[in-house]
Image: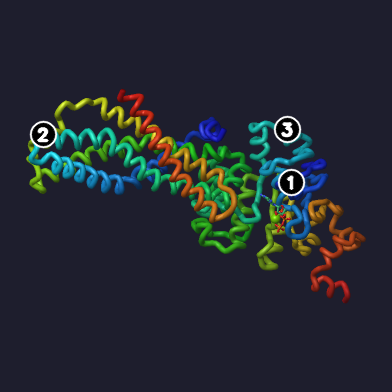
């Protein structure tokens, strides 16, 4: 029902275009910092752990780079970033829309004849579905790059082995797979909080509650989607 | 003209409106008065469809709003200006953007024309040069007035004001009453104003409807109201010691 209204024909195209651009800034550029920090540490830790695990064994040294790349691209970048954004963007969306609901701002939109779900939710979903893949690609580069820095500065492994590892047996489909997941995640972590916000009733207390619920539910849905898509796409 | 016919509304087991029928005429300022909790806000929200009525019908210029589909309702709503009791300003937008919003969404005006209209409306509610302020920077009474400016921005055919002058000083209150009354006459609007304020009743009450515990107890104009025999209405009107004193003298 709500989704139907979200995607029904907009009143004035140009307004929606501007809103989408605004949301791309808010959701995308606003999340760049946290994405970068998480990706760097994630990549570094995976590299160190793998290197520590195989030290002194018969496993070839390039496995470190290979493992880091596979883990970062296929799993960590798309999923962890989605979970972090479910917290950051999700709570933001739910509390913003929720407080508009309890202060009658949504009623004000409805009375003016504005399609409120379309106006409030559609731009957020479109913006996230568009910008999150870029965030994830950046995250992939940073994650794998952080591993390289570790190889240079920690002395745990040879940087050239690492480089060989990250190019070894590279299947471009991994990236496609990660980006497909990202698009589904982006949809989930914007539409679920928007739904919770839109159907908030009561006061400030309920806004807090629906924001918490929104984060919990969208995180769970991200994990579920991850499981389902992994089965569908990789097997 | 707006007509409501036998409308009823309950929230759960709490029946808020009981079999209410009224005709709100065009070109007149129609007042809904009654004690707090008597159902005034609920009536206005039922009329514009923010609450669905349980029974009865709402007619805008003879057309049954209750039976319209979403698209037809939207067309009616574009002709409605609604000022909320709690102002409901968009808090992410400045005063100017708030007042401009309905025009941006629905009119074909140029930015210059919109700005002129915004300034005109803000002037009329006694708030010139506040364009760049945000709702969080306004007092309660100022928010109300911006709410009115936004409601009249599109020159609506139907104007609803929910307690436009509660919380305003007597002078600003009169300014707002005069504004509502004069645009109603000037643009032949159907205006419904919710109020507690006896001063407004006596100033601008072309037609007054008195609600008591969800029922319509009395209707008439401002000249009849002081002569009423209705006990509940008398209690309501003469609750003010000030008015009692005036009448005794
Ligand atoms: N959304 C709602 N859900 C449940 N009950 C409601 C709701 N809105 C109003 N009510 C109930 O309806 C009754 C009438 O409320 P309403 O807001 O219409 O009063 P009012 O006449 O506007 O009062 P006031 O002058 O204080 O604004 C109250 O008993 C209130 O508890
Ligand atoms: Mg009220």
Q: Residue B221 vs residue A210: left or right?
A: right
Q: Which mark is residue B63?
A: none
Residue plotted at (82% across, 45% down): B19
Q: Which mark is residue A59?
A: 2
The tag earlier along the polypeptide, 3 or 1, is 1
Please name whichever residue, A131 or B126, is drawn nearer the observer in this view of the structure. A131
Residue A199, visible in the rendered structure: yes
Q: Which mark is residue B10?
A: 1
Q: Residue A47 vs residue A227: left or right?
A: left
Instruction: Read off the residue under disc 3.
Output: B67
Q: How many marks?
A: 3
Image mark 3: chain:
B
* Quarter of the displayed picture in which ligand 2 can be seen: bottom right
Mark 1 Cβ and ligand 1 under 8 Å apart: no
Residue A81 appears at what percent x and percent y? Answer: 32, 41
Name the secondary structure under disc 2.
loop
Q: CA distance from mark 3 to mark 1?
A: 19 Å
Residue B21 appears at what percent x and percent y? Answer: 83, 44
Q: Residue A148 vs residue A104: left or right?
A: left
In the rendered image, the quadrant that contains the N terminus of chain A is top right
The answer as to whether the residues below labels 3 and 2 share one chain is no
Please name whichever residue, B135 or A220, is drawn nearer the observer in this view of the structure. A220
Location of residue A227 by image quarter = top left
Q: Does residue A217 sit above or below B125 in this rendering?
A: above
In the rendered image, the quadrant that contains the C terminus of chain A is top left
The answer as to whether the residues below labels 3 and 1 share one chain is yes
Name the secondary structure under disc 3.
helix
Residue B158 appears at what percent x and percent y? Answer: 71, 44
């Amino acid at each position: 029902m709500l989704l139907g209204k979200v995607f029904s024909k907009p009143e004035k195209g140009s307004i929606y275009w501007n809103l989408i651009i605004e949301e791309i800034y808010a959701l995308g550029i606003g999340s760049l910092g946290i994405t970068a920090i998480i990706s760097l540490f994630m990549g570094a830790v995976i590299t160190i752990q793998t290197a520590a695990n195989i030290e002194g064994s018969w496993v070839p040294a390039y496995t470190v780079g290979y493992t880091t790349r596979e883990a970062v691209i296929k799993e960590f970048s798309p999923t962890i970033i989605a979970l972090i954004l479910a917290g950051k963007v999700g709570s933001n969306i739910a509390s913003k829309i929720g407080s508009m609901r309890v202060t009658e701002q949504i009623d004000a939109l409805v009375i003016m004849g504005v399609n409120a779900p379309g106006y409030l939710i559609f731009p957020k979903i479109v913006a996230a579905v568009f910008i999150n893949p870029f965030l994830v690609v950046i995250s992939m580069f940073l994650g794998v790059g952080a591993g390289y820095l570790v190889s240079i500065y920690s002395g745990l492994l040879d940087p050239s082995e690492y480089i060989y590892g990250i190019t070894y047996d590279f299947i471009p489909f991994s990236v496609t797979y990660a980006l497909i997941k990202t698009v589904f995640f982006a949809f989930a972590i914007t539409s679920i909080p928007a739904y919770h916000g839109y159907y908030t009733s009561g006061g400030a207390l309920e806004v807090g509650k629906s924001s918490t619920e929104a984060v919990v539910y969208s995180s769970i849905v991200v994990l579920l989607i991850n499981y389902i898509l992994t089965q569908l796409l990789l097997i | 003209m707006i007509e409501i016919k036998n409308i009823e509304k309950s929230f759960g087991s709490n029946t808020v409106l009981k079999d209410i029928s009224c005709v709100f005429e065009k070109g007149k300022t129609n007042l809904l008065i009654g004690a707090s909790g008597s159902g005034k806000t609920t009536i206005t929200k039922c009329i514009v469809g923010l609450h669905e009525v349980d029974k009865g019908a709402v007619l805008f210029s003879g057309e049954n709003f209750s039976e319209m589909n979403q698209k037809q309702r939207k067309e009616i709503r574009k002709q409605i200006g609604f000022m909320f009791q709690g102002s409901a300003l968009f808090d992410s937008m400045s005063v100017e953007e708030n007042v401009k919003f309905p025009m941006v969404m629905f009119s074909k005006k140029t930015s210059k024309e919109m700005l002129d209209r915004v300034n005109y409306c803000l002037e009329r509610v006694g708030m010139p040069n506040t364009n760049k302020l945000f709702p969080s920077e306004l007092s309660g009474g100022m928010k109300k007035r911006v709410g009115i400016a936004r409601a009249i921005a599109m020159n609506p055919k139907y104007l609803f004001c929910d307690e436009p002058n509660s919380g305003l000083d007597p002078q600003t209150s009169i300014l707002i009453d005069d504004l509502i009354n004069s645009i109603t006459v000037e643009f032949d609007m159907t205006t419904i104003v919710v109020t507690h304020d006896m001063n407004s009743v006596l100033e601008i009450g072309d037609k007054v409807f008195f609600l008591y515990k969800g029922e319509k107890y009395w209707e008439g104009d401002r000249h009849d109201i002081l002569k009423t025999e209705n006990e509940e209405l008398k209690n309501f009107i003469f609750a003010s010691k000030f008015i009692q004193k005036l009448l005794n003298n």
